[in-house]
Structures are given as structure tokens and as C-alpha cells.
Amino acid sequence: MIAMLYAPTLAGPAGSLPQSQEQEGAPTPDLLRELRDRLEGAEERIRVLEERASPLGGDGGDGGEAESTAPRHWLHSDVLGGRASLGGYIDLEARDEHGSTPTFRVHRFVPQIDARIGRLHVAAEIEFEDGGSDGSNGEGETKIEFAVVDWQFGGAFTLRGGALLVPLGRFNLNHDSPLNDFTDRPLVAVTVIPTTLTDAGIGGLGEFEVGEEGSVGYEVYVVNGFEGLVADPTTATGLRSEFDTSSGLRNGRPSLKADGSSGLSAVGRVDYSPRLGIEFGVSAEHGPYDVDGDLDLWIAAFDLEIAGGAVASFLEGFELLGEIARSDLERDAVARASGVPDDLWGFVVEANRHFMPESFRRALPSVFTPDSTLTAAVRFDHAELGSERTQRLTFGLNFRPIEETVFKFDLQFNYEDGSHGRVDNDAILFSIATYF
């Protein structure tokens, strides 16, 4: 399903065919070579993205040994002793924020492991953020971002348990830096659904066909849930809110060690694709968030991704992405006094245009190859955390020499409203992200 995000067009800019085809008569050899190169590039990009969309693939439905579908460039089992494959991604950021000193940041280094054991799959991601927990100045973080065991019973059902990527919204499931066209993550995916959102639990997922072209996918789990109101004897109420109007639910993300909210939560997502290139998703989580298990948290989200070519041929190369999420917090007098904020919500809308002028390919064929893509993008973010409102408008231009590697340039305009006040923090960002 991720293949729709960056599926290239075989047509040139604005959906037109190469100029050589506009001439009358039989196709020329140059035209045939050009179309062949574009087709090969498109097939390779779709292959890469399909692999990224389902790193634990293989049907396993015949009772035999499941096949690993880790991307081909990973170190595979013949190198790692017969079972495992190794890959991952890395990103580097440069930020010039108004009022601050320009800085570089090695934000993430994330090794990814995929292994097969008969009909079982094991997959994991270990994130080293800002140099890791033992990095310089101790400012970094090292954590398991994803670690699951899958037992496959065909495409319609897979039993999954472990450290799960919580299926709330689209972005949390597809947050890898090389996949996305902007450097910073959406505000709603940082505060209301605090990506990366990982939780310990067990459940199932699957996908089945609907009609001739459609499909329905699902993920449903029982998990520990958020820890938003924790014991703290130093406060007047004896409790401390991990939720606030600055970072939303982020500081109350679940523990992989134990449930700290005196009750488990249920979470799930259903997505529907009427045909390739269009997908709609609905997701929700419900469970207690306080130490006594008396106060409930509801989170609901809706997301969409639409490739323009799936709607009309003249929209080939365009795509529209969107996500909206809301969290409803049950509060009593103690929760209010402890600082639990009112309801939180936000949304993001992103429009992209993937293109590559033929003049660029002709001028620098070794740089702008058939696998290369330029993307012009614009994104609007809105987040309301209690009485605090933040909005962001970002314009982006990026270059992918191959689908798995991206150079991003962003202009970011921020606006805050509420007790925190207006901050002059507009920014220019540049980043490099690549799978390996």
C-alpha cells in the first residue's frame, strides 16, 4: 500500500508524453529507449516501496517455511548465518531556526532486523537517537522501537505479539525518515498520536480482497496503554500529569516493562482501498490512563492517501495525504488539579507533486537517472492542546537519486496562540535520509 506514496509517472511534467512521441509517424528508437527506462525505473520504485510496506511478508499459508521479504540490499541469511537479514535507515538534519544558532543533528540511526524461523517471522528496529543514550553529553536515547514475533496463517490473519507499532493513524505506521517528503514530523503525529508510538501487546492483522480491485486491511491489539496520571508524593494531589499543553500525550507514552495505568487498552485500525492508489483508514484506542484505572482515554483518527493517477490521468504524479486525530480525556477534580489538560486534537494535510524534467535527464544523465525523482510539496499542520494552538505551514523540495535515498529542503513557518505566546521560530531545514 505504501507503493502509492511515491509511485512515479511514466509521463513527463504535467502528464505529457515525451516530446519525441508528439511527432507523427512510428516511434523512434530514442523514444522506445526512453519509455523502457521509465518503465524499469517505475517497476523498481514500486518494488522497493512494496518491500518497505510489508517487511514481514510471505504467506506461510501452506504450512511450510515462511519466506523473508527483507529488501534485497539488506545483508541476507547467507551472510548472517542462515536466518536473519539486516538493514535500516539513517538521517542527518541541518536546522537554521530564527533566534537560534544553526546546527547539525544526527537525529536517527535505526538498524532493522528481519528473520524467519519456520512459519514464524521476527522483526525489530533499534533506534539510536542523537547518538544514543551513551552519546556525547548523554543527550541521546537508545530504545527498541519495534520488536515482534509473527505467526502467519495466510494473508487473512497473522498472530503478532511484542513491542508493537500502535496502529493509530497512517503516519505512526509509516514514520521512517526516507519514506516521508518533509524533515519534521506532523504536529498531530508528535502530540496527539506521539510518534513513534510503541506499546507491548498481542493481537492480529491481515488483509483480504474486496471486489475486483479493492482490499481491506486490519490490525487489532490488546496493549498496556498510556500512563498519563502517575503517582508523585511531592505534589499536592499525590499525582502528576504526564500529559500537558506543550507536548500533548507524548510524555505519557506506554511502558514496555509493565502497565502503569491499572488496566489494559484496546487499539485497532481498519483501512480500505477501493483500488491501487487510494486508501482510507480509521483507527481508535480506548483504555484507562491513571494509576487507579478510573479515568479513560479515547483516541480516534482518520487518515487518507490518494495518488492523483488513480483518480484521473491528468493528475498523474500528484498525491494527497491527510490525517486527523482527537483524544478525549476523562477528568475528575483530582485530574484537573494535577494538570491533566482538556481534549487534544489536530490534523495535517499534505500535497505533493513528483516529477523529473527531461531536460535535467539529458543535461546530467549520471545524476538524474531513470530512478531519480524530484518532489515539490506543501503541508499544513494544526494542533490544539487544551487552550494552546499551534499551526505550521511548510514548503518543501526534495530530490531522490533512488527511491530509498532523499535530500530534503524545507521552509517552515510556525504560529503559536495561547498562554505560551507567539514565538519567532520559523526555520530553514535541510536533511538527508536513506535506507541501507
Image (spheres, rainbow, N blue to C red):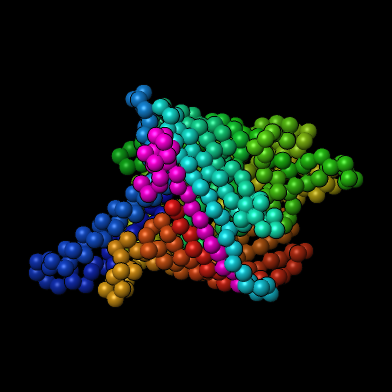
Q: Nearer the viewer, residue 374 or 189?
A: 374
Q: Residue furthest left?
A: 25
Q: Is residue 229 left or right of residue 201?
A: right
Q: Residue at x 67, y 44 (%)?
A: 253
Q: Is residue 159 magenta?
A: no
Q: Residue at x 36, y 46 (%)?
A: 72
Residue 354 visible (yes or no): no
Check the image and report above or below for 345 versus 118. Answer: below
Q: Is residue 85 magenta?
A: yes
Q: Is residue 239 left or right of residue 114?
A: right
Residue 84 x/y as whole percent: 43, 37
Q: Residue furthest right?
A: 236
Q: Is residue 191 left or right of residue 49?
A: right
Residue 429 visible (yes or no): yes
Check the image and report above or below for 233 versus 361. Answer: above
Residue 83 x/y as whole percent: 42, 34
Residue 260 x/y as whole percent: 73, 35
Q: Nearer the viewer, residue 211 or 126?
A: 126
Q: Residue at x 24, y 61 (%)?
A: 37
- Image: magenta residue range: 72-96
Q: Nearer the viewer, residue 60 or 118?
A: 118
Residue 61 x/y as whole percent: 36, 27
How many numbered marks appear? 0
Q: Residue at x 33, y 38 (%)?
A: 211
